[in-house]
Image (spheres, rainbow, N blue to C red):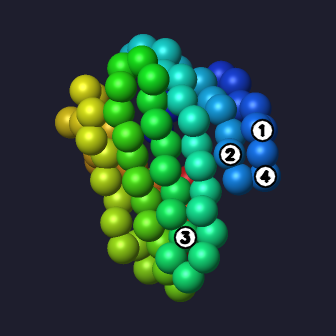
Amino acid sequence: MGKVVEIRRVTDLEWTFKLRDAIMLSGILRVNPGIVTDIEFRFRSPDGIGKIKITKGTILEASYEGILSLQLRPRVRDCSKILVGRETP
């Protein structure tokens, strides 16, 4: 989605991060493992929320809603394919 500038572990299932693309994005990534694994990331500036839901190597949902949704929604879909191992980075 961009170049990772900084990543910090908050807990085993939560990280804060900063990405650099056209602008600097900072946010929080949370993972909720289970039968359906939920991955949620929130950007603070500009505001937005993305969700990826995966079960048994199948992508159930890959979405992004927010100010940069036109640019980030396709990237979220591409990243979700990498998470389930269908594509290589």
In the rendered view, tell whether residue 85 sits above or below residue 26: below
Specify whether residue 21 is in view: no
Q: Which residue is mark 4?
A: 12
Residue 84, position in %: x, y?
53, 71
Q: Residue at x 44, y 79 (%)?
A: 58
Mark 2 and 3 residues: CB-CB less than 8 Å, in contact? no
Specify whether residue 41 is in view: yes
Mark 1 and 2 residues: CB-CB less than 8 Å, in contact? yes
Label 2 crowding class (10 Å Cα cut-off): few <14, some 14-19, many 20+?
A: some
Label 1 crowding class (10 Å Cα cut-off): few <14, some 14-19, many 20+?
A: few
Mark 4 and 2 residues: CB-CB less than 8 Å, in contact? yes
Mark found first going from the N terminus, 3 or 4? 4
Residue 5, position in %: x, y?
65, 22
Q: Residue furthest left?
A: 70
Q: Which residue is mark 2?
A: 14
How far is the residue under mark 2 from the one under mark 3?
Answer: 14 Å
How far is the residue under mark 1 from the one under mark 2?
Answer: 6 Å
In the rendered view, tell whether residue 80 sits above or below residue 9: below
Mark 4 and 1 residues: CB-CB less than 8 Å, in contact? yes
Q: Is residue 8 left or right of residue 17?
A: right
Question: Which residue type does callout 4 highlight?
Answer: Asp
Residue 4, position in %: x, y?
62, 29
In the rendered view, tell whether residue 59 sits above or below residue 62: below
Q: Residue at x 58, y 43 (%)?
A: 29
How far is the residue under mark 1 from the one under mark 3?
Answer: 19 Å
Q: In front here: 14 or 22?
A: 14
Q: Which mark is residue 37?
A: 3
